Structure formats: C-alpha cells, structure tokens
Amino acid sequence: MPSINLLPWREAERQKRQRDFGVALGGAVVAGIAVIMLTMLAYSQMISSQEARNERLTNEIAELEKSIKEIDSLERQKERLLARMEIIEQLQKSRPEIVHLFDELVRQLPEGVYLTGMRQVGARVELRGIAQSSTRVSALMRQIDSSVWLTDPEVERVETKQSGSSRQSEFVVYAKQVRSDAELEDEV
C-alpha cells in the first residue's frame, strides 16, 4: 500500500488558517480604523456645525445689541424732545403773565416811586427802586398786597440817602406773582 503522508497537508492547513486569521485580523484592524475615522469625521462635522450655529447666534446677538443701543438713543432723544415740548408749553402758558405783571406794576406803582431794576425767578419778583420817602414804599407794599396779580410783599431793605437837597429812599421789595385762573383750570 502506498504510504500517504498527511503531515504536509496539516501544515498547509495550519498555514492557510494562519493566513486567513492574518487577513481577518488585518480586515478587523482596517474596519476598526475605518469606524474610528468615520466617528471622528461625524463628530468633527457635528462640532463644526455647532460652531457655525454659535457664530450665527453671536452675530445675531451683536445685531440685537446694536438695535438696543439705537432704541436707547432714540428713547433719550424722545425724552429730550418731550422735555423741550414741555418747556415750550410752559412758556406759551406763561406768555400773558409777563404782560399782566408789567401792567399791574404800572397800575400799582404809587406816585413818587421809581423802579430801577426788576428780576424774576420763578414766581418771585424782586423790585429795586427809589422812592421820595419810606411812606411811599409802604404805599407800594399796600398796593401790591391788594393787587390781583401780585401778592405777599416783603421788604428786604429801605435805606434813606441824602441826594442833593432832598432825601430819597432806596428799597428792595419782593412779591409773588399770582398765576391766572385760566392756567389753573388748564392744569386741573
């Protein structure tokens, strides 16, 4: 009988299995590397898309901040315009008051009293002048007290000075200007 040697076949089979294992191992390594690369690519794309969204949000926030600053600027401008309008309205309401004040001063000024200066701050009116005597200053104060447009007369000072052969009294008197009834009705 012929002799059959099975050892080389086993050796060949073992080498074939080792080669198949090497190929499978190499395929598994390549597949693992491919999976890792694909995962890294997917995460990289997700990160870049999130960064793009973040940048868009940053740009939108910057645009909104510009709009907010512009709105704030417009609000301040609106407040300034409203304040100006209010001042103009007050001036329009107080326009006839000065006419009444001067008219009343002319009517209430007693004979022998001359005004040298007048100043008004708010409703308070300061009258400076010269009178022939201090009794004329008293008459001026009584006239102011009975006036429709002036009230609360106060004397700051009355100084009698010799001017040539005559004596004159320099005075400073304060009074308050009364607002008209029409203006009071407008405010109510």
Image (spheres, rainbow, N blue to C red):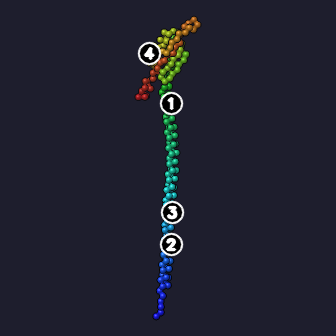
Q: Earlier in the sequence, mark 3 or mark 4?
A: 3
The residue that mark 2 highlights is 26
Query: What separation in Å lies between label 3 and label 1 (alpha carbons)?
Result: 70 Å
Query: What separation in Å lies between label 4 and label 1 (alpha carbons)?
Result: 32 Å
Q: Which amino acid type is marked by label 1?
A: Ile
Q: Which mark is residue 146?
A: 4
Q: Which amino acid type is marked by label 3?
A: Leu
Q: Residue at x 51, y 45 (%)?
A: 65
The residue that mark 1 highlights is 88
x and y percentages locating residue 159 in the rendered image: 52, 11
Nearest the eye: 108 or 31: 31
Mark 1 burial class by Cα count in 10 Å: few <14, some 14-19, many 20+:
few
x and y percentages locating residue 33 in the rendered image: 50, 67
The residue that mark 3 highlights is 41
Q: Earlier in the sequence, mark 1 or mark 2?
A: 2
Q: Which amino acid type is marked by label 4?
A: Ser
Q: Earlier in the sequence, mark 4 or mark 1?
A: 1
Mark 3 or mark 2, which is nearer to you?
2
